Amino acid sequence: MTVNDFKDLQGLKDNNIEELNSIGITTVEELKAAINDDEQIKTVIKTLSGVGPKTVAAWKDQLNGEAPAKKDAPKKEADEAVVVEAEAEYVVKKKAEIDPETADALAKRAIISGRRPAFKRQEWFRYAKFKDSTWRKPKGIHSKMKRRLKRRGPIVDIGFRGPASVRGLHPTGFEEVLVYNVEGLENIDPKKQAVRIGGTVGTKKRMAIEDRADELGIRVLNRMV
């Protein structure tokens, strides 16, 4: 099905259309040309709020005719015995205050991560015990994988890494800080840092940490709700 309007794209909202207009993209053809260009696609990802590399990749397939356009969900008859609560309005989560160079590097890292192959250990297909095992560097003197012969799978190499300037940062641009109690929030910079609550923290203490983080304007990356 041909995409004739922005609203035919899956996951694109009204505010995204205004954001596209702000960077000079006013038609579907201009958007198609932008997401097929390695440089312009980074600008699209950085500009659109709530849109990531996977959504843009789906748009690319949809605009190229490789995926069906969005279809309206069938309407269900209302049941008087069931009370349907209105959906809460989506609130955009807080993002880090980063410079344009860091934002560009994050967008570049997202593209690199999307095309990075799955590294599997040598002869993972031969033995069942290797199926879900982690990567191991091939070291045998007769190893075909070590010699990088064809049909032997990719080897972990420095060329697959992302930009060094954003290495270790959360996709939103925040620096992650692990906390286990309320006192760990006192030295956090809400503009550049976000917290992740430790996995051993109980529910009661977790709720206290989240409440205190809301008071200080700090984003919690792994909230309970």
Image (tube, grey):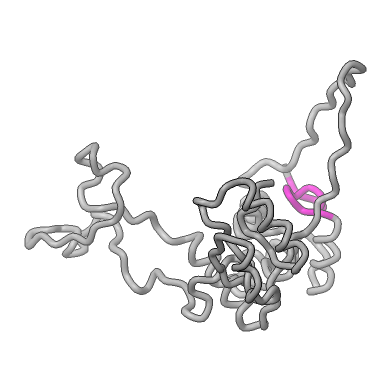
- Asked whether 139 or 183 is in front, the reply is 183
Direction from residue 186 to residue 153 in the image, left or right = left
Q: For the magenta stretch, what is the residue range? A: 2-13
Q: Is residue 181 above or below residue 127?
A: below
Query: Within the image, what quadrant is residue 191 found in?
Result: bottom right
Residue 64 visible, this orientation: no
Residue 63 lies, in percent from the top left, at 68, 53
* Quadrant showing the N terminus: top right
Residue 11 lies, in percent from the top left, at 74, 50
Direction from residue 68 to residue 141 in the image, left or right = left
| Magenta-colored stretch includes residue 203 | no
- Asked whether 86 or 224 is in front, the reply is 224
Query: Within the image, what quadrant is residue 100 found in?
Result: bottom right
Q: Is residue 201 above or below residue 36?
A: above
Direction from residue 142 to residue 34 in the image, left or right = right
Identify the residue at horizontal 40%, vertical 57% (top origin).
117
Residue 191 visible, this orientation: yes
